[in-house]
């Protein structure tokens, strides 16, 4: 892991809160001038700590209020089937997140949809058409209690 200090952590925190913040504003907030601040940001990008700058859309305003959490089991967990499954699901933009799991299911997916009918069609026509899929269990979110995009930076170890 790249060595970072408290100023780097403050820069990361500012960028997590607002990726559109100007360099001048970040520099002022962390008590630097713009040039060394820009150098630090560049170093954080090169180190992979900053992987992208994005605009977060409001899911409901975008017409995709349904969050389906799909627990999925494969027929067999052979390397070729795992690879094939993971390649196939990357084609579906409805799948927002996918995690390989330990325990009773092999994967957990978060799928978004405009309504239950559309989700059902996605399930039948896309997800269940993947040969290696054995079974799925879907739970629907009733309400979003916590949604964070910022990582808890208090766990980063700062040098100095």
Image: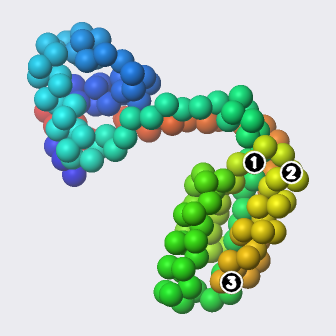
132 w.r.t. 125: above or below: below
Q: Earlier in the sequence, mark 3 or mark 1?
A: 1
Rendered location of residue 124, percent (x, y): 81, 69
Q: Give the residue drawn at x 34%, y 44%.
A: 51
Q: In this view, does 136 lie to the left or right of 83?
A: right
98 w.r.t. 26: above or below: below
- The Cα atoms of the two marked residues, 3 and 2, are separated by 24 Å
The residue under label 1 is: 113
Local crowd size for mark 3, using a 10 Å CA cut-off: few (<14), some (14–19), many (≥20): few
Rendered location of residue 129, percent (x, y): 73, 76
Local SS, label 2? helix
Q: Give the residue drawn at x 44%, y 38%.
A: 151
15 w.r.t. 84: above or below: above
CB within 8 Å, label 3 to label 2? no
Local crowd size for mark 1, using a 10 Å CA cut-off: few (<14), some (14–19), many (≥20): many
Which numbered marker is on residue 53? none
In which quadrant of the rendered view does residue 69 lie? bottom right
- The Cα atoms of the two marked residues, 3 and 1, are separated by 23 Å
The residue under label 3 is: 131
Local crowd size for mark 2, using a 10 Å CA cut-off: few (<14), some (14–19), many (≥20): some
Q: Which of marks 3 and 2 is nearer the N terminus?
A: 2
In which quadrant of the rendered view does residue 143 lie? top right
CB within 8 Å, label 2 to label 1? yes
Q: Which of 52 and 29 is in front in this view?
A: 52
Q: Give the residue drawn at x 50%, y 79%.
A: 83
Q: Is residue 29 visible?
A: no
The residue under label 2 is: 116
Q: How many labels does the image show?
A: 3
Rendered location of residue 127, percent (x, y): 71, 69
Q: Is residue 41 left or right of residue 21?
A: left
- The Cα atoms of the two marked residues, 2 and 1, are separated by 7 Å
């Amino acid at each position: 892991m790249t060595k970072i200090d408290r100023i780097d952590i403050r820069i990361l925190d500012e960028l997590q809160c607002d990726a559109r913040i100007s360099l001048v504003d970040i520099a002022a907030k962390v008590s630097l001038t713009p040039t060394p601040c820009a150098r630090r940001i560049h170093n954080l990008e090169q180190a992979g700590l900053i992987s992208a700058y994005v605009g977060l859309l409001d899911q409901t305003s975008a017409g995709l209020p349904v969050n389906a959490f799909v627990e999925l089991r494969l027929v067999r967990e052979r390397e070729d089937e795992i690879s094939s499954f993971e390649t196939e699901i990357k084609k579906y933009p409805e799948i927002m997140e996918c995690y390989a799991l330990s325990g009773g299911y092999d994967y957990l997916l978060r799928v978004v949809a405009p309504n239950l009918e559309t989700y059902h069609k996605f399930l039948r026509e896309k997800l269940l058409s993947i040969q290696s899929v054995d079974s799925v269990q879907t739970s629907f979110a009733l309400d979003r209690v916590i949604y964070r995009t910022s990582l808890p930076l208090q766990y980063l170890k700062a040098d100095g």
